[in-house]
């Protein structure tokens, strides 16, 4: 027993002497719990709603107020017609489009129900399904009944994912996770391993510059991650039958800045960790899991508290998930997704610059 206690004491002492592992052991769980507690909610509130009011009467405005006064919807636009509303669905600015047809008020005294149309964005099956259910509830509570005939009849239409199949919007997100995990983890652990086995010093005495060392380390693992994602893509298309409505070439171009972000984060982790164990824990707990929680991949961003919604703008995975779902399900390309491309490019430049500066300092 004394030998075992001495060994346990030795391990605790080793942990205490490691200044980087202690925060991971005690601070990271609290950090993860705070993020998960606020971000991990399946409730769908404040669904983004665009309204096309073609009737423009007191009755149609009263119907629109029934939607906007509820806690379920948030009015984001009032386009003049559906052609102007369609781009809002493509960009994800609106999740539902309510269309009140001309002559809506004139049908008040008829025995047939008045008709309104709601078009939902099926690229996010969760928000689309629940949004349609909320719309039906608002109409049911607002319209009343005239005998056996409802006062207002809802005609829903789902775009981009008509059957609301959850795997059609989950699988593109999983592809993003594969790319992020493999590129970041492989890069960080490979660079740290050089320091562990003592070969980093051998690299420093070669004619290679620090930039050439960085590129020499990043490019092979970028190629490995590329092969892995190319291998996984046919599985998504042919096994899970996720539709690819956009251009594969545009998808490849839009992927480049996200790739640069994940490789830069892997390089940054390698400058913060001294062992492969530290690199793995830093990558997973500090960089990967928060991105999964805050990217909108699983939990809708609009349901999070405002500070967390603002924090999502610093998450590269948020933009890339939007790109993948846009290209796969909506068939949109650079013309619509250029804001995400620009945001990822700016983040990639900043991350790579910071990682390179820290890497050069560590080499020095």
Image (cartoon, grey):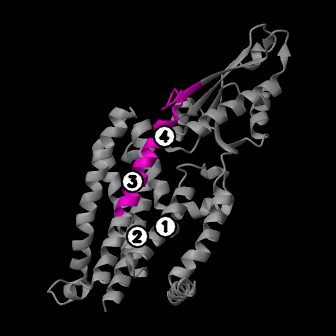
Name the residue nearer the viewer: 88 or 330: 330
In the image, what residue occupies the spot 72% across and 27% down?
A: 136
Image coordinates for residue 82, horizontal then vertical, percent: 56, 30
- Sequence-earlier tag: 1 or 3: 3
Mark 3 and mark 4: Cα distance apart in space:
15 Å
Report if the CB atoms under discs 2 and 1 are less than 8 Å apart: yes
Is 21 on the left or on the right of 358, as rendered? Answer: right
Report if the CB atoms under discs 4 and 2 are less than 8 Å apart: no
In the image, what residue occupies the spot 27% across and 69% down?
A: 218
* Residue tagged 2: 265
Mark 4 and mark 2: Cα distance apart in space:
26 Å
Is 53 on the left or on the right of 346, as rendered? Answer: right
* Residue tagged 1: 287
Please tell me whether mark 3 sits on a helix, a strand or a loop: helix
Please tell me whether mark 2 sits on a helix, a strand or a loop: helix
Residue 23's image quarter?
A: bottom right
In the image, what residue occupies the spot 57% across and 87% down?
A: 2
Closer to viewer: mark 3 or mark 4: 3
Closer to viewer: mark 3 or mark 2: 3
Mark 1 and mark 4: Cα distance apart in space:
23 Å
* Residue tagged 4: 169
- Sequence-earlier tag: 3 or 2: 3
Which of the numbered marks, if any, corresponds to residue 178? Answer: 3
Name the residue nearer the viewer: 322 or 362: 362
- Residue lying at the far left of the rendered structure: 207
Q: Is residue 177 magenta?
A: yes
Image coordinates for residue 259, horizontal then vertical, percent: 34, 60
Report if the CB atoms under discs 3 and 4 are less than 8 Å apart: no
Which range is magenta?
157-183
Callout 1: 10 Å neighbours few (<14), some, many (20+)?
some
Callout 3: 10 Å neighbours few (<14), some, many (20+)?
some
- Sequence-earlier tag: 1 or 4: 4
């Amino acid at each position: 027993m004394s030998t075992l206690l001495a060994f346990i004491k030795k391990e605790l002492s080793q942990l205490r002497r490691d200044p980087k592992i202690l925060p991971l052991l005690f601070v990271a769980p609290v950090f993860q719990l705070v993020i998960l507690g606020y971000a991990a909610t399946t409730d769908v509130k404040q669904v983004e709603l665009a309204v096309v009011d073609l009737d423009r009467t007191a009755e149609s405005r009263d119907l629109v107020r029934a939607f906007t006064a509820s806690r379920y919807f948030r009015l984001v636009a009032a386009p003049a017609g559906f052609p102007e509303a369609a781009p809002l669905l493509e960009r994800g600015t609106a999740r539902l489009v309510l269309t009140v047809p001309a002559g809506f008020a004139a049908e008040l005294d008829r025995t047939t129900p008045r008709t309104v149309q709601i078009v939902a964005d099926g690229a996010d099956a969760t928000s689309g399904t629940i949004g349609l259910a909320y719309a039906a509830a608002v109409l049911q509570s607002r319209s009343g009944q005239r005998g056996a005939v409802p006062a207002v009849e809802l005609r829903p239409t789902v775009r981009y994912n008509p059957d609301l199949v959850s795997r059609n919007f989950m699988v593109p997100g999983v592809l993003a996770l594969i790319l992020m995990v493999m590129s970041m983890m492989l890069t960080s652990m490979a660079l740290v391993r050089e320091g562990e086995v003592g070969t980093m010093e051998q690299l420093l005495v070669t004619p290679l510059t620090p930039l050439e060392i960085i590129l020499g380390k990043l490019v092979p693992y970028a190629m490995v991650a590329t092969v892995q994602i190319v291998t996984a893509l046919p599985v998504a298309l042919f096994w899970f039958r996720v539709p690819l409505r956009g251009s594969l070439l545009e998808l490849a171009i839009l992927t480049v800045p996200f790739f640069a972000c994940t490789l830069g984060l892997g390089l940054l982790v390698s400058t913060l960790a001294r062992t492969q164990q530290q690199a793995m824990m830093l990558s997973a707990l500090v960089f990967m899991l928060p991105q999964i929680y805050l990217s909108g991949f699983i939990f809708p961003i609009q349901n999070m508290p405002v500070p967390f919604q603002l924090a999502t703008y610093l998450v590269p995975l948020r933009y890339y998930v939007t790109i993948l779902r846009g290209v796969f399900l909506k068939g949109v390309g650079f013309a619509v997704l250029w804001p995400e491309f620009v945001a990822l490019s700016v983040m990639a430049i900043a991350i790579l610059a910071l990682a390179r500066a820290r890497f050069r300092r560590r080499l020095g």
